[in-house]
Amino acid sequence: MSREIEPFARLVAALTKLPGVGAKTAQRYAYAIIRMDEKDVDDFADSVLDCKKRIHYCSVCGNYTDKDVCDICATRDKSIICVVKEPKDIIAIERTKDYDGVYHVLHGTLNPLAGIGPDDISIKQLLKRLDGVKEVILATNLDVEGEATAVYIARLIKPMGIKVTRIAGGISMNSDIEYADEVSLGRAMQNRTEL
């Protein structure tokens, strides 16, 4: 388009708000949407709105769900809790098919330089869930913030007599859980170490 057309520019600007979508990718997506037939565009827009309206955090673990309590919390072994940074990390661990416990999503990690302390992530909610728990697996990312968060949580939980483990090697330092392959992540879960 030789001159900027306002609806197209708005669509491109909206698409660039998605993670990993730069201006050129947003333009390609916008052109693809323009070429779609109207019914497909309506279905696309409806699915985005429906997703935004119906999906929220599980009242127990903080994962995404369209119910009050997610299916994992409703059906799985509650004596083991795997603590992750974000809901997308649950998807990565579930792909391994090596874990049958429940999860707890922190929605961030400790990062004093960014002003994120223990009260800014869901550590208090985790501590309230520990009755009857035998093991807490700390599966935060293997970066500085993830390690600091794991150590902090371990120091809070170990005095309670609950086994606290950390995912093992198999995932390289400074990598995100969501990008780990199933084999490496499965090995990390199986070979976790006690803190």
Image (cartoon, grey):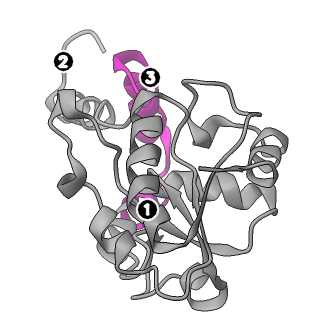
Quadrant, the N terminus? top left
Which residue corresponds to mark 2?
4
Q: Give the camera-side residue of 176 and 187.
A: 187
Residue type, mark 2 in image:
Glu
- Distance from Cα at disc 2 to Cα at disc 3: 17 Å
Foreground: 37 or 184? 184
Q: CA gap, disc 1 to disc 3? A: 31 Å
* Dominant secondary structure, magenta: helix
Q: Quadrant of residue 114?
A: top left
Q: Are marks 2 and 3 in contact (CB under 8 Å)?
A: no
Position above or below: 160 against 118: below
Label 3: state its secondary structure.
Answer: helix
Pointer 3: what residue? Answer: 25
Residue 27 lies in the magenta-colored region = yes
> Which contiguous range is marked in magenta?
20-47
Q: What element carries label 2?
A: loop
Residue 112: x %, y % from top left? 21, 33
Type of amino acid at the residue the image marks with label 1: Val
Q: Name the residue under label 1.
A: 105
